[in-house]
Amino acid sequence: MKVLLINGSPNEHGCTYTALHEVEKTLNENNIETRIHWIGKKPVAGCIACFNCFKIGRCAFNDAVNEINSKLDEIDGIIIGSPVYYAGPNGSLAAFLDRLFFSGGDKWFRKPGACVVSCRRGGASAAFDRLNKYFTIKNMPVISSQYWNQVHGNTPDEVKQDLEGMQTMRTLGQNMAYFLKCIEAGQNAKISKPVYEDWIGTNFIRE
């Protein structure tokens, strides 16, 4: 089993990484393979609604979005980490995730997802809510913890002093590992996957 952790901070080993790494250590202790993908410092293109991904099976922008989507069959769960910018996730990360989830289509279905946010003081719950919406629109179970998945601090060392926040990360790792093992047990028991109806798309404009 493998979990992908996405570090959406422009700082590769900053506060967000410190939180994700605490989750990662717990996953590894539970024999879950992990990989942390850092989105980097370069500008990230947002979705331009070209819908080419529906035709060619990948995003029109050839970057790490396509790399991750091409390996979705190897990924069993995902954890997204972001700093808090104006009570929301980092803009580059949001652009990255918009394209990642849209172009990935139904390959995301049923993969458990979680997010963690890092803030100096406030705005964490709003950013946390925003990130969870990627999972809830893709038929993905959302993995929770003992509190909202947030850490506080202005530096990695300060984050490590947030004892409750770090414990929340470890609990999240335990819950993700447990859920993945439950899924594996269900597959071994040959429990049928959900069968979905054909999607009905509507809007609120009617003639």
Image (cartoon, rainbow, N blue to C red):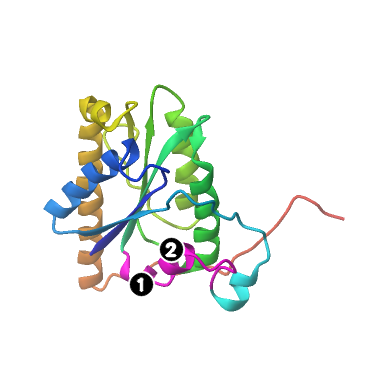
Residue in the picture at 28% in, 70% down: 191
Residue in the picture at 45% in, 58% down: 139
- Counting every numbered tag in the picture gives 2
Q: Where does residue 43 sit, x and y in percent of width and height?
A: 54, 51
Residue 196 visible to the viewer = no
Residue 139 visible to the viewer = yes
Q: Quadrant of the N terminus?
A: bottom left
Q: Tell me where residue 168 sits by quadrant.
A: top left
Left or right of 75, for residue 126: right
Q: Tell me where residue 74 sits by quadrant.
A: bottom left
Nearer to us in this view, 198 or 142: 142
Mark 1 and mark 2 in contact? Answer it, CB < 8 Å. no
Q: Residues within 10 Å of mark 1 (few under 14, many from 20)?
A: few
Q: Where does residue 207 sit, x and y in percent of width and height?
A: 87, 55
Which residue was labeled with disc 2?
Answer: 108
Query: Relative to residue 25, is residue 101 depicted above or below?
Result: below
Q: Which residue is farthest right?
A: 207
Q: Which residue is farthest front?
A: 42
Which mark is drawn over residue 73?
Answer: 1
Q: Residues within 10 Å of mark 2 (few under 14, many from 20)?
A: many
- Per the model, the C-alpha gap separating discs 1 and 2 is 9 Å
Where does the magenta region start and end? 58-75
Q: Report the amino acid beneath label 1.
A: Asp
Any magenta on residue 184? no
- Tag 2, which secondary structure? helix
Q: Report the amino acid beneath label 2.
A: Trp
Nearer to us in this view, 39 or 162: 39
Residue in the picture at 45% in, 52% down: 135
Q: Earlier in the sequence, mark 1 or mark 2?
A: 1
Residue in the picture at 31% in, 29% down: 155
